[in-house]
Image: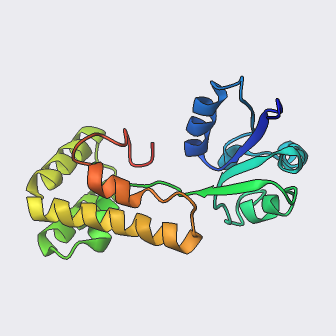
């Protein structure tokens, strides 16, 4: 067996940073590289990213193909060695615990939710205070029925499944989230 340590390279948003920190604790097994979260990458980082990709044994990444970012995951894949393993992770976003009001407004089939949220959005645009906003938010959330909340959770899991399928991820997590979100808190915010 070889004594060579695997070189891992992570690319993606703040979710990949968490995995990077977790695996970094196994420094006796892995050498790990993480340059920056994709939204924080600067032009000076591009060459370092390409070099890390060319040297890594395992590339662990999220699909990043938005042209607003300085480099995409597809571009980085072009710099990998032919024997490097690429593992595509989902970009997790599960807002089932904390409904995003605008999302509820856009997807809800319940008119009273849409009307209440529309009122909220209009009020925010009229520059009402944060306390008044919090009160409105509390009132709207308080009006949600168990069925509406379940509809939102199912929709959130459904959207995650669609992203996993569209991106052809190697390690899908939507089924695990769907089976476990009631047993344990899987997220502390909608994407962390």
The quarter in which the C terminus is drawn is: top left
- Residue appearing at x 17%, y 52% in the figure: 141
Residue 92, how many percent across, how many down?
Answer: 47, 54
Residue 20, how many percent across, how many down?
Answer: 63, 36
- Residue appearing at x 57%, y 31% in the figure: 22
Between residue 22 and residue 118, name the one nearer to us: 22
Residue 120, by quadrant, is bottom left
| Residue 145 in sight | no
Horizontal side of 2 relative to 120 (left or right) equals right
Residue 172, how many percent across, how many down?
Answer: 48, 60
Residue 29 sits above or below residue 86 on the image? above
Residue 84, by quadrant, is bottom right
Residue 106 sits above or below residue 42 on the image? below
Horizontal side of 173 relative to 54 (left or right) equals left
The colour scheme used to paint the residues is: rainbow
Horizontal side of 187 relative to 76 (left or right) equals left
| Residue 67 in sight | yes
Residue 168 sits above or below residue 170 on the image? below
Residue 117, by quadrant, is bottom left
Between residue 101 and residue 126, name the one nearer to us: 101
Between residue 6 and residue 106, name the one nearer to us: 6
Horizontal side of 171 relative to 151 (left or right) equals right
Q: How many marks?
A: 0
The quarter in which the N terminus is drawn is: top right
- Residue appearing at x 82%, y 45% in the figure: 56
Residue 74, how many percent across, how many down?
Answer: 75, 65
């Amino acid at each position: 067996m070889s004594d060579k340590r695997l070189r891992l390279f992570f690319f993606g948003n703040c979710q990949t940073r968490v995995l990077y920190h977790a695996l970094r604790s196994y420094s006796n097994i892995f050498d790990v590289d993480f340059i920056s979260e994709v939204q924080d990458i600067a032009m000076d980082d591009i060459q370092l990213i390409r070099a890390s990709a060319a040297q890594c044994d395992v590339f662990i990444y999220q699909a990043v193909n938005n042209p607003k970012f300085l480099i995409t995951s597809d571009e980085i894949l072009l710099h990998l060695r032919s024997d490097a393993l690429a593992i595509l992770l989902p970009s997790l976003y599960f807002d089932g615990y904390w409904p995003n009001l605008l999302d509820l407004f856009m997807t809800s089939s319940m008119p009273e939710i849409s009307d209440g949220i529309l009122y909220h959005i209009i009020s925010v645009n009229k520059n009402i205070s944060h306390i008044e906003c919090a009160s409105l938010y509390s009132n709207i959330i308080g009006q949600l029925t168990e069925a509406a909340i379940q509809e939102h959770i199912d929709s959130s899991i459904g959207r995650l499944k669609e992203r996993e399928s569209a991106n052809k991820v190697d390690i899908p997590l939507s089924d695990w989230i769907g089976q476990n979100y009631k047993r344990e808190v899987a997220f502390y915010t909608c994407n962390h």
